[in-house]
Image: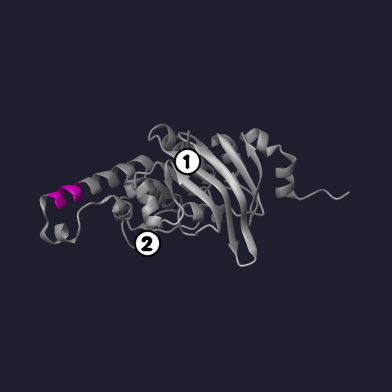
Amino acid sequence: MAILSVQNLTLRFGGVVAVSNLSFAVEAGTIASVIGPNGAGKTSVFNMITGFYQPSEGRIRLGDDDLVGRKPSEITRLGLARTFQNLRLFPNLSVLDNVKSGMHSRTRQGVWGAIFRTGRQRQEERLITETAEACIRFVGIEEYAGRAAKALPYGAQRKLEIARALATQPKVLLLDEPAAGLNYEEKEQLIRLIGEIRDSLGITVLIIEHDMGLIKRISDKVTVLDYGRKIAEGKPDEVLRDPRVIEAYLGREEA
């Protein structure tokens, strides 16, 4: 069963077509990847799925819910979370507070509960803290819980952004180039973490990534874009041998 589906998706910026008639589906409980050369339209697809861009045409569904026209906050509440290619942390807040901020979409108590410190408000605050602490432990950065985000090593900041996304309690997690800037050992940790997110938490994962070694090791299915169009789709070994994919990355050999 597809938990996330994209149907005939098109995005235009004036006369420029960034994404053209794109369709693909992500099955529940899988790790899927979208790859392609720079400028292929990968991040534009993520931005449409998460409500930052509105598509010119097409449909996006999360389970039975239509996502087109919804705000990013609504899409998060429906069960879809993301990280960004460029880190978007609150640099002066602690690791714990950064992750607690991810729980905002799940809170129930309003301004009166906060003012009068009702029992339900206190109970909800305890739950938020416990959930945030569990997410921090899950990604393996509990030693940094009290530090400001900007004081963390880069690899730990990447994990922090994943922890904050997990705090929203997603059904589907979108990772935008999560291995960017990581060294070998950090990439190995990331591969294990993504597997645990799927296997231990039951969260479906969709990744944009340039590291073909990582893609080959963790992906159940790969969709390849070039100039905003899908040129190949299938299992990693098959896709990475496809002549169209090789040409998109390396260019056509001159006669």
User: Which callout, 2 or 1, points to the residue nearer the camera?
Assistant: 1
Q: Position of residue 149 (x, y in %)?
A: 36, 57
The answer to which of 8 and 31 lies nearer the viewer is: 8
The answer to which of 149 and 18 lies nearer the viewer is: 18
What's under tag 2, amino acid-wise?
A: Pro
- Residue 164 against residue 28 in the figure, above or below: below
Q: Position of residue 232 (x, y in %)?
A: 66, 41
Q: Position of residue 19 (x, y in %)?
A: 61, 55
Label number found at residue 110: none
Q: How many marks?
A: 2
The answer to which of 22 and 246 lies nearer the viewer is: 22
> According to the image, label 2 marks what residue?
91
> Does the rendering let one see residue 255?
yes
Q: Main secondary structure of the magenta part?
A: helix
Label number found at residue 205: 1
Is residue 125 covered in magenta? Answer: yes
Magenta part of the chain: 120-126
Q: Are marks 2 and 1 in contact (CB under 8 Å)?
A: no
Give me the residue at 19% from left, 49% from top. Answer: 124
Taking the view exactly as shown, the residue that stands out farthest to the bottom is 14
121 sits left or right of 46 in the view: left
- Residue 90 against residue 180 in the figure, above or below: below
What's under tag 1, amino acid-wise?
A: Val
Give me the residue at 39% from left, 32% from top. Answer: 200
Is residue 112 covered in magenta? Answer: no
Give me the residue at 61% from left, 58% from top. Answer: 18
Question: Few, some or many C-alpha atoms within 10 Å of disc 1 (few <14, some 14-19, many ≥20)?
Answer: many
248 sits left or right of 55 in the view: right
Taking the view exactly as shown, the residue that stands out farthest to the right is 255
The mark nearer the N terminus, 2 or 1, is 2
Element type at mark 1: strand
